[in-house]
Amino acid sequence: MKKNLFKGNIFVFVCTLMASIYGQAQTKIFSLFSENFEKPKYFQFQLNSDTIPAKGDNKWIVNKTYNGSGVYPNTTDQNTTMSEQIGNPNEHYLHIHDSKKPGGAANANFDPTNASETWAILPQGICTMSLVDIRFVFFWLAEGSANSFGEVYYSADYGAWTQIGQTKYNNQGIWKFEEIKDVSFENVEDLRFAFRWVNPGGESQNSMSFSIDDVHIIGTYAPNANPVDIIISDIVAEVCKGTTFIFTFEFTDTLCDGSYLIMLSDDTGSFDNPTSYWSFSYPYPFTTGTFGLTLPTDVYPGNCYKIKINRLSPLPALEGIASVCFKILDCDNTITTRQPPVTFEQGNGDTLCMGSVIDAPFQSWGVFNAGNLYMLELSKPDGTFPPPGKPKILGKNPDDKTYNDLFFPPVGSVGGLVPDTIPESCNY
């Protein structure tokens, strides 16, 4: 498992081989949200929400009923539209219906005598950071009356619900395409929409209620007008293969939560056939981070390796800027033993009694495979180590980790027992 250090946070991610590489996006329009209500048990709007308590018997429902059963007027066929075309006509749609009417007419209708107010809310916000030209589009109809009508609302970054679009959605008996655009939709972490129905009661004329279908939130990424780069810095000049090196990255603008791909070039700095890939997720609103990235043990030594970070999803997909060249070397493993704490405890000086417990800290560099043993070895009385002679092992620690300032913990240790059979000496 690779340990990866971020500024102010520690994240662990699983390195995953990836098969695809995303190029720099040109100006592109894409869908951030889509709902056609064709999965009635899993549609994304919360109906008759308890967040804003509903009142009255006229309530939201999703079904594919268009016949008023002789109780209310039939709902207009979805093949009849003012403009554009509904994707899957005469199937499931969102609408108000009279929930208490005998006979159970469940098409787009309402009881004009029963005062009602109810909301259909999008409870999960949409992130629009780095995007422009955000549009909320849908098909609708609503005959209603002067006092019985639908409304559209939005909430940005958990703020209050604000009415948007037409003042009243009514007097429309044929399906109509609606597009709502506002700069308030841009560069927000949490954008939500809601439909509201209201009627005052005390009326008598039956008519079609507020009905909705084919809802989309659309955004545009325009790199020329609003470019976002992923820049890598603080690259070391040389690093040993199989070891971890640290680099810093920065987004030049705030992005939504996203999935990213780190790519290691070949030894010429080309990404046409990358040496390795790592995937990770990075959250809004952070724009900088520091990675400790462990290089493969089988990478070929070279003088001009580079790394870059690409954003994979959600859109926009972005290609990062490659780092400067750095060398990957084939280095030997090294271990540096530090002075055991017991030898500089107050009053002991550098003296250690035979039969004492000893714990020796150390740091290591290189790659240590599974089955590796760190062993604490005591020198001969003259301070030399075998050969010749047999090494005196005080303790063993089965461990394949590397311990240095690039890892956590930065220091390892091996403990053991000093034999009581060795001769006294000041040169161990």
Image (spheres, helix red, strand yellow):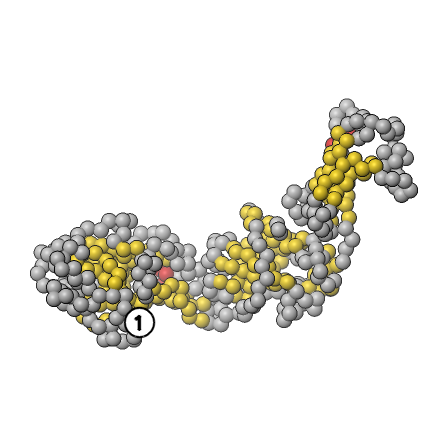
**Residue for point 9% across, 63% down:** 205
Farthest top residue in view: 347
Tell me the amino acid under the disc marked 1.
Answer: Asn
Q: Quadrant of residue 421?
A: top right
Q: Secondary structure at mark 1?
A: loop
Dot 1 crowding, Cα within 10 Å, few <14, some 14–19, many 20+: some
Say whether residue 258 is visible: yes
At 54% across and 70% down in the image, what residue appears? 23
Give the position of the C terminus as an image quadrant: top right
- The foreground one among 318 and 181 is 318
**Residue 192 position by quadrant:** bottom left
Is 119 positioned to the left or the right of 346 in the image? left
Q: Residue at x 10, y 56 (%)?
A: 113
Q: Position of residue 163 (x, y in %)?
A: 27, 58
Point out residue 296 in the picture as x, y percentages from the top left corner.
68, 58
Image coordinates of residue 216 in percent, x first then y, are: 35, 66
Among the 4 quarters of the image, the one containing residue 116: bottom left
In the depicted structure, whether residue 277 falls above or below residue 350 = below
State the image coordinates of residue 4 (x, y, percent, origin top left). Answer: 60, 51
Q: Examine the rendered structure and indicate whether residue 96 appears above or below residue 374.
A: below
Q: Which residue is mark 1?
A: 88
